[in-house]
Amino acid sequence: MELKGKKVAVLVENLYQELEVWYPVLRFREAGAAVKIVGPKKGEYASKLGYPAVADAAASSVRAADFDAIVIPGGFAPDRMRMDRAMVKLVADGIKQGKCVAAICHGGWMLCSARGVEGKKLTSYVAIKDDMINAGVKWVDKEVAVDGNIVTSRKPDDLPAFCRAIIEMIK
């Protein structure tokens, strides 16, 4: 169990991308991590296809210091997440504290809102490339980009490399 004793937060909001939430949740649980699903409020959220995810905690009730990693999935959820101050603060604090902060696909929107990624070589779904560049990111087109404590990937096809990079960083 390579992640035994590790704690991972996977963020959720309505219109999340199914694979980008559930693949990391199940992969990290399989590796022995304690995974907590965190939303703006405790309760149920629906994916783009209506698949439910239940947030174990509200972002306002947890701290970045509680986790070894914070994972931001894509879909349209990150656009909603960044309207919640506690969600943005959790990510911003994770970045400042040197925690592993990982974003896939449109999850990069949260990195833009949280700040602290200026000058880093990161990737995202190509549709938000301009947003990432405008936030000061040196955007690269790679399945996984790791710069300091930040891990990013482009799309669901990149999930194996994305999760391996997170595991490598926090084990």
Image (tube, grey):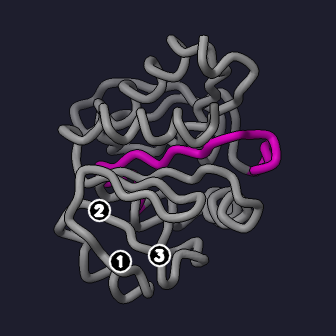
Circle 3 Cα neighbour tier, 10 Å, few/some/many (<14 / 14–19 / ≥20): some
Please state if 166 lies on the left or on the right of 144 as rendered.
right
Q: Nearer the viewer, residue 118 or 71?
A: 118
Please state if 82 lies on the left or on the right of 41 as rendered.
left
- Say whether disc 3 or disc 1 marks the residue closer to the N-terminus: 3
Q: Are marks 2 and 1 in contact (CB under 8 Å)?
A: yes
Circle 1 Cα neighbour tier, 10 Å, few/some/many (<14 / 14–19 / ≥20): many
Residue found 57% across the figure and 53% down from its top: 101
Residue found 71% across the figure and 27% down from its top: 6
Q: Nearer the viewer, residue 76 or 111?
A: 111
Gap between marks 2 and 3 measured at Cα: 13 Å
Residue 132 disc label: 1
Where on the picture, by quarter, is residue 131?
bottom left
SS at mark 1?
helix
Q: Are marks 3 and 1 in contact (CB under 8 Å)?
A: no
Residue under pointer 3: 120
Please state if 98 lies on the left or on the right of 78 as rendered.
right
**Residue 76 lies in the magenta-colored region:** yes
- Quadrant for the N terminus in the image: top right
Identity, as a three-letter code, of the amino acid under mark 2: Ser
Residue under pointer 2: 124
Q: Name the spot of residue 152 as percent of width and height, x first.
A: 39, 55
